[in-house]
Amino acid sequence: MIQSIIFIKLGGSLITDKARAYTARREVVARLAEEVRHALDAAPGLRLLIGHGSGSFGHWAAKPYDTRQGVSTPEQWRGYAEVAAAAARLNRIVSDAFLEAGVPVLSVQPSASARCHDRFLEYLDTHPIHAAMAQNLAPLVYGDVALDDVHGGTIISTEDIFSYLADELRPARILLLGEVEGVLDSNGDVVPRITPADLPALREALSGSAGVDVTGGMEDKVTRMVELVQRRPEARVHIFSGTVPGLLIRALLDDHLSDGTRIAAQL
């Protein structure tokens, strides 16, 4: 039975050590790849689009050049190229791990076609993604650099890409895996549900993620996902920890999993 599309994001803080430059957590990537494989074995009709953050690869490369804010000088353009290369190196690690686990991913490089206006993603060539899914492959995207007609260049996060693709692919669910259990309130407790009406009160608690992160941390992620469910109310977002073995399998197979934080247009 063919099911609706599920987007999965492996957070940069989960698959890399964001406090150490260019350090992948290969064992974590391998375990998550195996979990996806087991879920596909249990439910062959699952249709997946997988993404990952750039973690200590893209973020460390970008910080000296402030690439997120814009690219204009020769030095900044060299930095732009270095960020793209670093992000691609991590993508190769992830791609190899998933293929080795038997998950048929096809890496799609966002920077090859992405165009932004004032740091907002306005265009991404989706033909390779549709072609991959038509052949039962799982497209694999990632946080990357992008040309920007206002700032020269910038960085787009996986959430930016998911938000853009959601209008075309209309996923039923979006799973965001990180190191923490979910979205935490000011007391450090997991917030089980978030709707657009809840966001203003949560902003103070969403102070950003640990380590080097040039794309805004948890506040930006939650804000982008709230905007997404407002635009596409049929979609549901689930933020939870990827450090717990087996939890990704359960999330893929059980839409009612209670762990973590759910974001929806309404309760």
Image (cartoon, rainbow, N blue to C red):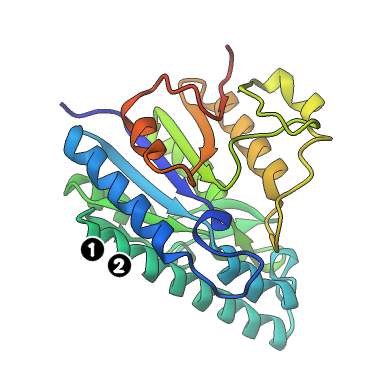
Label 2, on which residue? 96
Image quadrant assignment for residue 204: top right
* Residue at 53% over, 52% down: 11
* Contact between labelled residues 1 and 2, with CB atoms less than 8 Å apart: yes
Image quadrant assignment for residue 48: top left
Counting labels gives 2
Query: Which one is nearer the viewer's eye here, 140 or 233?
Result: 140
* Residue at 56% over, 80% down: 81
Q: Position of residue 27 (x, y in %)?
A: 40, 62
Label 1, on which residue? 100
* For residue 114, side relative to residue 198 (left or right): left
Q: Position of residue 202 (x, y in %)?
A: 77, 29
Quarter of the image where the N terminus is located: top left
Q: Position of residue 227 (x, y in %)?
A: 63, 32
> Eyeballing the image, is 65 above or below 207?
below
* Residue at 57% over, 48% down: 179
* For residue 200, side relative to residue 74 (left or right): right
* For residue 246, side relative to residue 197 (left or right): left
Which element type, helix, strand or loop, lies under badge 1? helix
Query: Which one is nearer the viewer's eye here, 267 or 253?
Result: 253
Q: Residue furthest front?
A: 245
Q: Residues within 10 Å of mark 2 (few under 14, many from 20)?
A: some
Q: Amino acid at mark 1?
A: Glu
Q: Position of residue 151 (x, y in %)?
A: 72, 66
Quarter of the image where the C terminus is located: top right
Q: Amino acid at mark 2?
A: Asp
Label for residue 64?
Answer: none
Which element type, helix, strand or loop, lies under badge 2? helix
Q: Residues within 10 Å of mark 1 (few under 14, many from 20)?
A: few
> Eyeballing the image, is 259 above or below 177?
above
Query: Which one is nearer the viewer's eye here, 29 or 161?
Result: 29
* For residue 65, side relative to residue 24 (left or right): right
